[in-house]
Amino acid sequence: MEAQSSPTFRYALRLAYHGAEFLGWQRQPEGRTVQGVLESSLSAWMRHEVAVTGVGRTDTGVHASNYVAHLDCAREVDPKELVYRMNRFLPDDVVLFEAVAVAEDVHARFSAAARGYQYRIQRTKSAFGRDTAWHYERALQVDLLHEMAQSLLGEHHFGAFERSGSAETNGLCTLTRAHWLERGDQLVFEVEGNRFLRNMVRSLVGTMVEQAVADRGLNAWHELRASQKRTASGPSAPAHGLTFAGARFSVPLFDGREHPQFIQER
């Protein structure tokens, strides 16, 4: 007689974290990571090893205001109790908003159809929010920023904005949102797409800012993108200005609350 495997219960999580003290999302042999902190806290409460899978990686210093993950555990739990307990186990820079039981074929990473990010630039000196925005006071051609962002919509090759040394990919991404918003003394870049290459958003922002400072014009921007070479683009914007804003799934996990939380909705 074949031994029967123990049942597995899967729960989706919606959470946020301040990335300043983390070496990114993904667990590492050494160093503090969001995935590592979550797994340690969940395992301590459930008294067995718990693995957590995230919707995507975030780099060292990057934040998330609306992140999605899933976990598998050996026993059924009350989602509200899970949230209550975890927010007492977790450190102050991680908060769990809600949890929900999901089918075993729901996967935080592979079931996600789109992901969204925000990048904030602080245009004037401020005593607050310096840890979640890039302080940059040099004059920018804002009209050029808008034009460059508009040109990103649709399916394009983004090889010029992929981190050097990354594993080879086809470089094609489809962006359904890419625009700059002016909000008081901040510029906010909002972007959403079906996939993102490693370091792509920060490379895009850093390069757009470099182009807008020098006012190089839209033709130079198109030539840079067509090169498909990272060496042709500008420096990456600092990590602390970037926030993961949410993800979309074919079947909403939290009644749409997991969708990217953008400033300007369509």
Image (cartoon, rainbow, N blue to C red):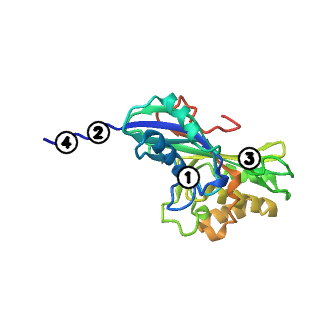
Q: Nearer the viewer, mark 3 or mark 1?
A: 1
Q: Mark 3 = which residue?
A: 188
Q: Mark 4 = which residue?
A: 3
Mark 4 or 3, nearer chain start: 4
Circle on res. 81? none
Residue 34 x, y percent position in the rendering? 56, 50
Residue 84 x, y percent position in the rendering? 55, 32
Mark 3 or 1, nearer chain start: 1
Q: CA distance from mark 2 to mark 4?
A: 9 Å
Mark 3 or 2, nearer chain start: 2
Task: Residue type at mark 1: give it.
Answer: Trp
Circle on res. 6? 2
Image quarter where the N terminus lies is: top left
Q: Within 10 angstroms of label 2, few (less than 14), some, or many (20 or more) residues?
A: few
Task: Residue type at mark 3: give it.
Answer: Val
Q: CA distance from mark 4 to mark 1?
A: 36 Å
Residue 34 appears left or right of 221: left
Q: Within 10 angstroms of label 1, few (less than 14), some, or many (20 or more) residues?
A: many
Q: CA distance from mark 4 to mark 3?
A: 56 Å
Q: Nearer the viewer, mark 3 or mark 2?
A: 2
